Image: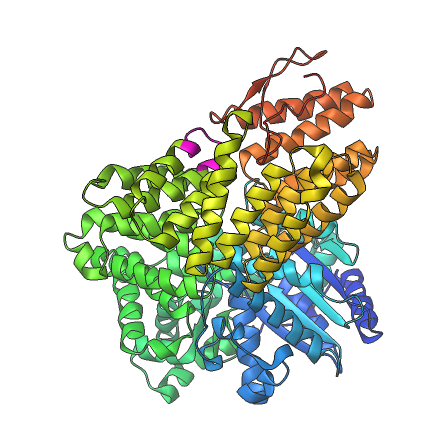
Amino acid sequence: MTIHTVSPLFVGRAGELAALGDALSRARAGSSSTVLVGGEAGVGKTRLIREFTGRAGDALVLVGGCLELGTDGLPFAPFSAVLRGLVRERGRDGVAALVPGGTTRGLARLLPEFGEPDRDGAEARARLFEQVLGLLERLAEDQPVVLVVEDAHWADRSTRDLLSFLVRYQRSDAGLLIVVTYRTDELRRTHPLRPLLAELARVGWVSRMELRRLTRREVVKQAASILEREPSPADVEMIYARSEGNPLFVEALLSEAGGGFALPESLRDLLLAGVERLPEETQELLRVASAGGQHIEHALLSAVSGLDDAELSRALRPAVAGNVLVVDGEGYSFRHALIREALHDDLLPGEHTRLHTRFAQALERDPSILPAPRGAIELAHHWHSAHDATWALVSAWAAAAAARKATAYDEQLRMLSRVLELWGQVPDAAERIGADHVEVMSQTVTVAHLAGEYERGVALAGAALAELDRDADPIRAAVLLRKRGIIRYDLGRFGNLDDLRQAAALTADGPARLRARVLENLARMLHGTDVWDERIATAEQAIELARQVGDAACEAHALIALTWARARDYSQSEAHLGGFAEARRLALGADAFSALLSCAISESDTLEGAGLHERAVRVARDGVAEAERYGVARTSGAFLSINLAEPLLSLGRWDEALDVVEHALDLMPPPPHQASLQGFSTDIALARGQLDRAEESFERARSVLSRGVFRDQNVASELPRLPTVECAPRHRSGVPQCRFVCC
């Protein structure tokens, strides 16, 4: 029996469809918005979106899906798919003409057709984000644009960051509608999409809908549409009990049942039922395709299967006609991810290894089949799934480099971690990749810091230092000590000064650029009246060295440290604030976003200390916005949120301060930041006499701090109804203080 694909089975979603239609009407009128569409697997998210986009009329519909390979997401996958579709329709030059500024260096990180990216780093990521948003807004000048991002539960961190940027920074009058779908049943308590959804839900133009299961009455309507007759009460009872109102399962049950409703024993049988009715040749090809992921390119499947285009199309036609596969761009997608998962899980161990090996070999023979970095990451996935340690290691190393070019730090960290995991299984690993174990660990430390995995970075740096002979290789040792010192500082851990002082000693006769950066880092971390003179002298030396080697970013950082030290005499702070303006000028000239954020942190701290609360609020609020723009909201942005909440408290604007705190906590920042933010919540709750709420915030702060030992902790006094707690430092740049009003 044929399964209808859209309207005949589209029941129980009239309200949701109307809401999406209203959002599109607002886009036509020039008002931008975002709709988040959640629901469990099989509940009908994809069908809702297809019905909606099918009625979109004059709107330009751009659809991209997040892809899942084992436990690895693919960086920027939906945006690469959207861009690839635009290039097919309008040509490379046609798309390039729409990019603000006329340069496509950012887009080159999504599609190689746009050339070679010029450099890596957060500045490159910021450029990419701005160009994607600019392209969408230019497209919307001619017609309303609907951007659909499907399966966001599989989104990697890079995709989540770009999606958050687009939603938050789209112009309100751009005529852009963003629709995001995700599986709610995938969102465990620690799932990384949860804080993003909480963050976006706070944005005024974002609405959220969750597709519920069908009621018994709606299941009857769906069943009648499929069977083309009214089902009997007994049939309805059986179908409803088995499906629990999940539309996909209702459809699969009825399609499998034929006329007798011989229900399958398990969900896997249920999902594979439609496959088993297909010709054996088609079933075999679907098993091959299942190893390629939810979406597979036609050319890649042809290469793996050994079939030419005509043979492949003929073999797959029954799967498309039977609604197991759908045509998706230049390839195919399984109608539902659960079908692919069931097919893949049904492979025998030998088949599993053999198929993944064939995919890996096909990608190696012709890397151009898939765009970068997707091709490199998929190659690494297949060699790893094929249990070939040597090629899994080599391909993971290459995939890490590809992810770095795309500024996809989370994926780069995953690939480098895999290299380290496999190192002991490959005797000639260093020769294979051209880097020794210490170098791999050193790179992983850097990426762990960029990805916000601070604890991991500290542990890896320690392991690398343990392997290294400092006397024989003092410069590499200094580099690792510097990296660990910076991360310890950001994490609020002991030992950061020892690391930097050791690094300074090792670089006494070393490269001037490295020494300048080590001294700048050391100056930044020196606090307290007993080291004030050392801080000023170290910062001045760093400025001099940075000027000699032309390192404007380092000079800006050192000038910030020097200005902050001189301005700590709050009675004279106005006379020194010009140093921050000069540092900001240097940072802007060097395109050094980290120096800009550091300047915002130190300047807002200085202004608050001087009692200039309103100015502190403005500087900190601008800094939070910049951190979000550069994709570091959960690290630098969370710290700036601390510097924003404090003057808001000083001004008595408690509700605003709580909004800032709750938004920052949603991002799951590093532990010291979490504890300080919870401290503000405790302060406000105590001041309002809300002792239960104060106790809850207090316990959360103590729970965070109990997971590790942090530098400069103070012991709080006894609170009414609250136990004693060790508090996180309130300021990274200042004398550590307890955040609780009792102290």
Identified at 49% across, 80% down, the residue is 114
Quadrant for the C terminus in the image = top right
User: Principal SS element in the magenta part?
Assistant: helix
Residue 229 sits in quarter: bottom right
Q: Is residue 346 visible?
A: yes
Q: Is residue 260 visible?
A: no
Taking 580 as reference, is 251 above or below it? below
Taking 142 as reference, is 76 above or below it? above
Q: Position of residue 701 (x, y in %)?
A: 61, 26
Asked if the stretch drawn in magenta spans residue 34, the answer is no
Asked if the stretch drawn in magenta spans residue 492, the answer is yes
Instruction: Give the magenta range.
Output: 488-497
Quadrant for the N terminus in the image = bottom right
Left or right, residue 396 beside residue 598: left
Q: Residue furthest left?
A: 427
Taking 614 as reference, is 125 above or below it? below
Q: Nearer the viewer, residue 93 or 392?
A: 93
Judging from the image, the colouring scheme is rainbow
Identified at 57% across, 35% down, the residue is 732
